[in-house]
Amino acid sequence: MGIVSEGAVHRGEAGASGELAHIQVDTSSTSVCRCGRRGCLETFVSGGAFEATANRGEVWWNSPYLKEIHDDVGHISMDDVFSGIAQGDQQCVKIAADAGIRLAGVLAVLATIYNPAKS
C-alpha cells in the first residue's frame, strides 16, 4: 500500500506509508491489535474484528441468525457475519455500520491532512 501524489507512489521508509489499520481510534478500548497496541482501527474494521464482535454473547444472543450458528457450531466466522449482512440481519448490519463509522472518521482526518485539490 502507498500514497499516490502527483503521479508517484510514496511508500515511506518501511513501505508502510498510508497504513491506516494501526491508527489508534479508541484509547480506552480493551481490544488488543496484532501490533500490540490497543484500539487500532484494525480491531474495529476487519474480518477478524467482525468475527470477535459477533462472538460476544450480547451480540449473538440478540440475533436469531447468529444464535443459530453459535448454537450449532459454537463459533461465528467472519463469513457468517458477511452472510448475515447480505441477509439483513440487524446485529450483523450493526457490526458493519459501527465499523463504517470508525473508518469514516479516520478517512475524514486523512482527507483533511492530505487536503486534495477540488476537481
Image (cartoon, rainbow, N blue to C red):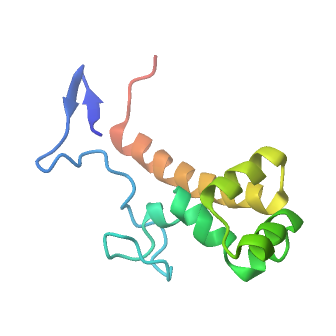
Q: Is residue 54 left or right of residue 45?
A: right
Residue placed farthest to the front in the image?
Answer: 72
**Residue at coordinates 72% horizontally, 71% vertically from top-left?**
73
Q: Is residue 5 left or right of residue 83?
A: left
The picture quadrant where one finds residue 5 is top left
Q: Is residue 51 above or below residue 37?
A: above
Asked whether 99 or 55 is in front, the reply is 55
Q: Name the quadrant containing residue 37.
A: bottom left
- 11 w.r.t. 85: above or below: above
Q: Provide residue 4's location: percent of width, then percent of height.
A: 28, 29
Q: Nearer the viewer, residue 64 or 5?
A: 64
Tell me where residue 82 appears, x and y as whole percent: 68, 50
In the image, residue 112 sits, relative to residue 80, either above or below, namely above
- Identify the residue at horizontal 77%, vertical 44% (top origin): 86
Q: Position of residue 105 (x, y in %)?
A: 53, 53
> Can residue 3 be seen here?
yes
Query: Which sits in the foreground, 114 or 63?
Result: 63
Q: Residue at the right extreme?
A: 64
Count of marks overlaid on the render:
0
Q: Position of residue 110 (x, y in %)?
A: 40, 45
> Residue at left 48%, top 46%?
107
Q: Is residue 70 left or right of residue 8?
A: right
Q: Is residue 45 visible?
A: no
Give whichever of 104, 52 is nearer the camera. 52
